Amino acid sequence: MTAATLAGFIGSALVGLGLYGLITDPQPIRKILGFNLIGSGVFLLFGIVARKGAAAGFAADPVPQAMVITGIVVAFSASALAIALVLRLYEVAGRVSLRSEHTSNKAEK
Amino acid sequence: MDAAPIASASTAGGSLLWLAIILPVVGILASLLSGGRHAERIALLLMPTGFGIAISIAIFLWRSGQPLVYVIGGFNPPLGIALRADGFSAVMLVTTALIVAAAGFYARANFATPPGITEARAPLAFWILLQAIWASLNLVFLGGDLFNLYVAIELLTFAAVPLVCLDGRAETISAALGYLLFALCGSVFYLLGVALLYGAYGTLDIVLLSDRVSSEPVVWVAAGLMTAGLLAKTALFPLHLWLPPAHANAPAACSAVLSALVVKGSFFLIVRLWFGVLPNVPHEAVSFILAALGSAAILFGSVLALQQKRLKLLIAYSTVAQIGYLFLMFPLVQGPNLWVAEAWSGGIMQTLSHAFAKAAMFLAAGLIAESLGHDRIRDLRGIGAVMPMTLFAFGLGGLSLMGLPPSGGFLAKWLLLKASIEAGRPIWGAVMLSGGLLAAGYLYRVLAPALSSDVLHLKAPPRRSREAVALALALTAIALGFAPKAFFDFLQIGRVAVAGGSS
């Protein structure tokens, strides 16, 4: 097994674990963690893609690396926004739950 | 479609494309710097300018009959990024400019900085986020690079989510959080698909990619991931759970923008993906699934709308249903057939007419809620006598949703219906017709008591100018029903011929 294949498996595992957490866990904080796990898996995949460019003769393909940096910034801001909402919800309601009494809305399917 | 996509040099009028994106961004920065009540003035000042730019893009496109292209910094794709405008982009740009302006004008009463203080949080946030939604939507409509579009769709989410919870009630924060989690899950899957496509073909430029992709497993997986992610953001059944609480609890001006425009942003990308990037990949099965989900959305959303007790929730569930119609165009835009152009026009027409009609209905519902202090449908008896103009705007919007002539909604559904019969797939037509009946049912639930002769007392009568905004949007939705043939030719500009078609 090459390093790239191993990294690919780890990336897929991270995506799978993150998705499982995002769907099944009712706690918003854990859902945010799940989202970050998926994100890490995707970023790892971008790393492999950059390495694949290297196999084609370049030192390393810089484009996927630039994308990962942008992706990390976006994921960071997304997590910050989500955490800010969770904190505010706790301040206002005294509890953090996605279930609203008016619409019985659940965040998961 | 020109045969040599590599030569994607900037065309005449290409500079307008970056101007359309930069203008609201400049507005955001200026609003942040000057702060306070200036944010409102800057936003309102930019709206006619932005509308002018959108109209100019449409005129350039109309004259040349070819998509407009602007290559950023002169770096050609695949390394550089190109902005492109086709017929669909141009009409969406104009629609966005109009609805953002209408929502802004309407919201002046709700989000004015109170006299005596220099800055209030909610107004400042509202005016900046409204411009941010506008900027990111323009980028979504013009972007020619899939990663660039990922950033655009993320910016759109970040601008849209806080608009839901501007009033800071626990209920709205919870709705915003649910919306954000759905949207984040969607965007991360879109990004995963982007990574796979880049890994396989070494470019993310839409035109270059459409030339290189072939029907193979990596493309199927990538397209599936991207579509699923975008569906979560578009709120297609069964991923619609976040939409009703978010859209129904937001302030009316925000609901109008969210329902009319923001969900269309991700729908636009699904259309770009399947008809721009993958026109040469057969997608009968995917189209069938999308249309089946769309049909389920129409029936399920309409039936739930029939059961709602609050007016704004009813309108939000109606959005769930109307989104379903958009996806009925997918199985009909297939192959080099005669009805493809009709189905394409019908799908775009539904996007436009729903945008105007739904914005009008949310603004009207907002006025009703403000004047009465609630929006319980049961207690709306007699509202027609005291707020005739508002109810008229609501009713006209409803007319378009039902698909009664003359209205944009009628024309959209007529085109789709015609295409479905010509294509020998009347099942989609049957779904459309039953959706229209159900829409008539849930609108009757509002209009019948509203037009009763009971006497109703308002807390405060609505401002005439704000009623006029809602009415103008509703009239635009009706006016779309009189679109000339030239308009439909315009929509076809830049449409890539599907699967071996000669266009």
Image (spheres, helix red, strand yellow):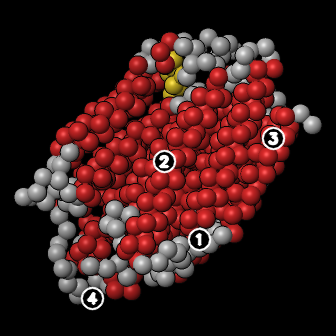
Respond whether the residues carrying marks 3 and 2 are from the same subunit: yes
For discs 3 and 4, the disc positioned in front in the rendered view: 3
Residue on which the image places disc 1? A27
| Rendered position, B492 above or below B410 | above
Q: CA distance from mark 2 to mark 1?
A: 20 Å
Q: Specify few, some or many for label 4: CA neighbours under 10 Å numbering under 14, 14-19, or 20 or more.
A: few
At which x and y percent is residue B234? Answer: 57, 54
Q: CA distance from mark 3 to mark 4?
A: 68 Å
Instruction: Determine contact: label 3, label 4, CB under 8 Å.
Output: no
Question: Could you tell me the amino acid type at mark 2?
Answer: Ser
Judged left or right of residue B186, residue B114 is left
Q: Secondary structure at mark 2?
A: helix
At which x and y percent is residue B397? Answer: 41, 61
Chain at tag 2: A
Respond whether the residues carrying marks 1 and 4 are from the same subunit: no
Q: CA distance from mark 1 to mark 3?
A: 29 Å
